[in-house]
Image (spheres, helix red, strand yellow):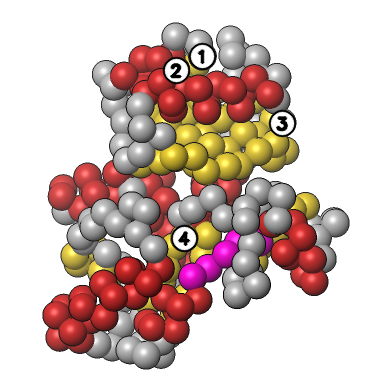
Amino acid sequence: MVVNENQKCVEEHKEVHVKNENPDGLVQKIQEDYQRIWKINYKESRLHIIYQHSYFTIVPNEVYESKHKGDYLKYNTVLFPSDSISCDCNTDFDVSIPFIPFVNIHNELLEYYSSLGFYHAVNSALNSSYQLCKNQSGEYAFVYIQQNSFFLVLIKDGNLKMANYFNFDTAEDFAYYCLFAIEQFKFDKQHMHLSFVGKISKESEIFTLVYNYIRHVVVINVLELNLNLKNKVSHESEIFLNQNPILALQLCESFQEN
């Protein structure tokens, strides 16, 4: 996605599916795209990478120690000696988020651009979830859904209970992951609130399945969370951003900062 930071608008977007692509394959694609597109049109741009993968964990800041980043991660992902570990900080919930970036991709991009920022997508999901139930008591689930993947954030009485990333192929897969997590934290399905953010409609099979078990379910248009941004994107870009809600949330945060 190409963003004009001065005018705060989306100039261009393109979705390319590289599911299960290895980092070396991505490096080759970057090399090809740079020569074919980026070098010509976006030579002086700033780059931001948003990681959406399961190679992360969440640690309360009261027990977090930077020197143990690898120890926190080793319980939910396989670590290799060559892995680099970065960390985001979320002030809303006072937690740290160690995660694995793809350093070889960073190094390749830094051959072409001097400015490179990178984040883990779960941080934007946490920020958004906090704002959506800020100062509210009760049990809340927020689902940031995209094609074949989603982030699930569970909050009770303002306290973060869980945030995780899942891949799925069928509506039944989705319902299993979502409902199993909710049951593990003993949320009351008759009184809790579940919000879908992203690529879903009330007529979809996923919505129907979840609604069979949870009474209060809503769908949120991600751009309704930032009306200034909504007014500055084309209809095609609005569809794209709702299909990629984490990207839209990161864009909202970036525009607010600037």
Residue 159 placement, left or right of 165: right
Report the disc number at residue 157: 3
Residue 32 placement, left or right of 84: left
Q: CA distance from mark 2 to mark 3?
A: 22 Å
Q: Is residue 135 visible?
A: no
What stretch of residues is rendered in magenta? 97-102
First of labels 4, 1 by sequence position: 4
Above or below, 214 against 119 in this view is above
Provide the residue designation for mark 1.
214
Of labels 3 and 4, the one closer to you:
4
Q: Amino acid at mark 3?
A: Asp
Looking at this view, is 6 or 241 the one in front?
A: 241
Looking at this view, is 84 or 94 the one in front?
A: 84
Looking at this view, is 243 or 248 the one in front?
A: 243
Secondary structure beneath dot 4 equals strand
Q: CA distance from mark 1 to mark 2?
A: 6 Å
Taking the magenta stretch, the answer to whether it contains residue 99 is yes
User: Where residue 183 appears, x then y in whole percent?
Assistant: 64, 20
Q: Amino acid at mark 2?
A: Val
Q: Residue at image x 38%, y 83%?
A: 108
Q: Residues within 10 Å of mark 1 (few under 14, many from 20)?
A: some
Q: Residue at image x 59%, y 14%?
A: 189
Q: Are marks 1 and 2 in contact (CB under 8 Å)?
A: yes
First of labels 3, 4 by sequence position: 4
Report the disc number at residue 51: 4
Provide the residue designation for mark 2.
210
Residue 219 placement, left or right of 66: left
Q: Is residue 119 visible?
A: yes
